[in-house]
């Protein structure tokens, strides 16, 4: 499957995205040119590969989820006021918010254009599943924004938020590949479950890397979640497990309007270290991937395809960016 990634990349760069007005289409080309793991379209190909042996035949369909994903990133970055995306200025920083909103809207339409490459007798199912996924992503983003105004968030609430905001698109990607490969409805459902469990593990790893990652590799501001008081799994568990002194330290930093950024990051990380947050989060990540592997092992599919998907997930578990 490694040879498919450059072909997928080439197909993305070949997409007919439009050219005029330039400040509508240039931001789309820009964000797609920033690269990334191409995780979601690769999952479409890997899902298809569980039954069929020619995933190169569905490169056009696979690009739909990557275009949609980058549309969500463009809008999320506006809402988060994020300065960097994959180590480069975000679209709203390089242009402005208005351009980023309109270019993002155009990307959503372009995603549907790519979905139209789905075989006619499967298209209705594909669009219905995609629409459900897209609405879930918006629900997850709204929950994430709501959390900013809430005094406390439970672990269960946070996991549900990242399931919707991040994991359902991974689930859809695998399920879509299975649909294109003409797998049964039960198999497609299993693929969605596998993708969602792995997707939760993936987002938890993202949260961990935000605090402990290498800025040069991570491509985003390390410690950004701490600086913005984002209610991640790490902060939720730290507040739950800390003693009175540690909790007071955390609450003090959460309440400060003015602070020295590195001082705050270091202080919060110190509490995280004292209560074992790194190890706890890593164990949680592993538990979600284990659930994905368990369902995958029980799936009636090509053994070669299952092995390739397992290897793909194992690389995600070990990532440092």
Image (tube, grey):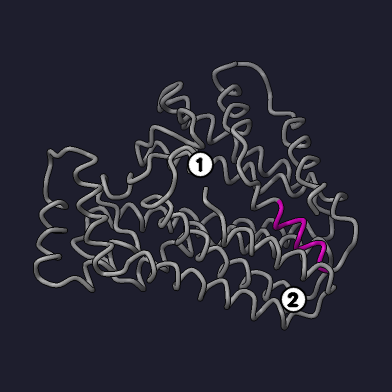
Q: Is residue 223 left or right of residue 101?
A: left
Q: In front here: 287 or 143?
A: 287
**Residue 85: where, in percent of width, then height?**
48, 36
Numbered range of the magenta stretch: 42-50
**Residue 140: where, in percent of width, then height?**
43, 58
Quarter of the N terminus within the rendering: bottom right
Predominant secondary structure, magenta span:
helix
Task: Identify the residue at image location x=80%, y=52%.
Answer: 118
Q: Residues within 10 Å of mark 1 (few under 14, many from 20)?
A: few
Q: In the image, which is nearer the foreground, mark 2 or mark 1?
A: 1
Q: Is residue 187 left or right of residue 247?
A: right
Q: Which residue does the numbered mark 2 point to in the structure image?
A: 187
Task: Identify the residue at image location x=12%, y=51%.
Answer: 255
Q: Which residue does the numbered mark 1 point to in the structure image?
A: 217
Tell me, yes or no, whether the highlighted magenta stretch contains residue 188.
no
Q: Secondary structure at mark 2?
A: helix
Task: Identify the residue at image location x=32%, y=66%.
Answer: 277
């Amino acid at each position: 499957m490694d040879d498919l990634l450059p072909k997928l990349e080439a197909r993305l760069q070949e997409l007919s995205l439009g050219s005029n007005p330039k400040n509508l289409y240039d931001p789309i080309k820009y964000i797609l040119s920033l690269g990334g793991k191409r995780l979601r379209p690769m999952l479409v190909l890997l899902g298809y590969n569980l039954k069929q042996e020619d995933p190169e035949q569905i490169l056009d369909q696979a690009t739909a989820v990557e275009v949609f994903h980058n549309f969500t990133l463009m809008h999320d970055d506006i809402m988060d006021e994020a300065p960097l995306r994959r180590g480069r200025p975000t679209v709203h920083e390089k242009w402005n918010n208005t351009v980023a909103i309109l270019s993002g809207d155009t990307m959503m339409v372009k995603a549907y254009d790519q979905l139209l490459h789905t075989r006619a007798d499967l298209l209705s199912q594909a669009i219905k599943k995609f629409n459900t996924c897209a609405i879930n992503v918006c629900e997850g983003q709204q929950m994430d924004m709501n959390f900013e105004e809430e005094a406390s968030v439970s672990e269960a609430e946070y996991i549900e938020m990242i399931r919707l905001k991040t994991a359902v698109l991974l689930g859809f990607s695998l399920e879509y590949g299975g649909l294109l490969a003409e797998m049964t409805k039960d198999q497609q459902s299993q693929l969605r479950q596998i993708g969602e469990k792995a997707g939760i593990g993936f987002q938890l790893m993202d949260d961990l890397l935000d605090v402990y990652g290498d800025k040069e590799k991570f491509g985003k501001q390390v410690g950004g979640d701490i600086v913005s008081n984002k209610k991640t799994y790490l902060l939720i568990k730290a507040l739950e497990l800390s003693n009175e002194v540690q909790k007071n330290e955390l609450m003090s930093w959460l309440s400060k309007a003015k602070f020295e950024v590195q001082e705050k990051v270091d202080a919060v990380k110190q509490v995280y270290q004292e209560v074992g947050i790194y190890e706890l989060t890593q164990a949680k990540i592993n538990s979600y991937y284990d659930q994905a592997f368990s369902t995958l092992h029980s799936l009636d599919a090509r053994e070669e395809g299952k092995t390739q998907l397992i290897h793909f997930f194992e690389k995600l578990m070990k990532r440092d960016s």
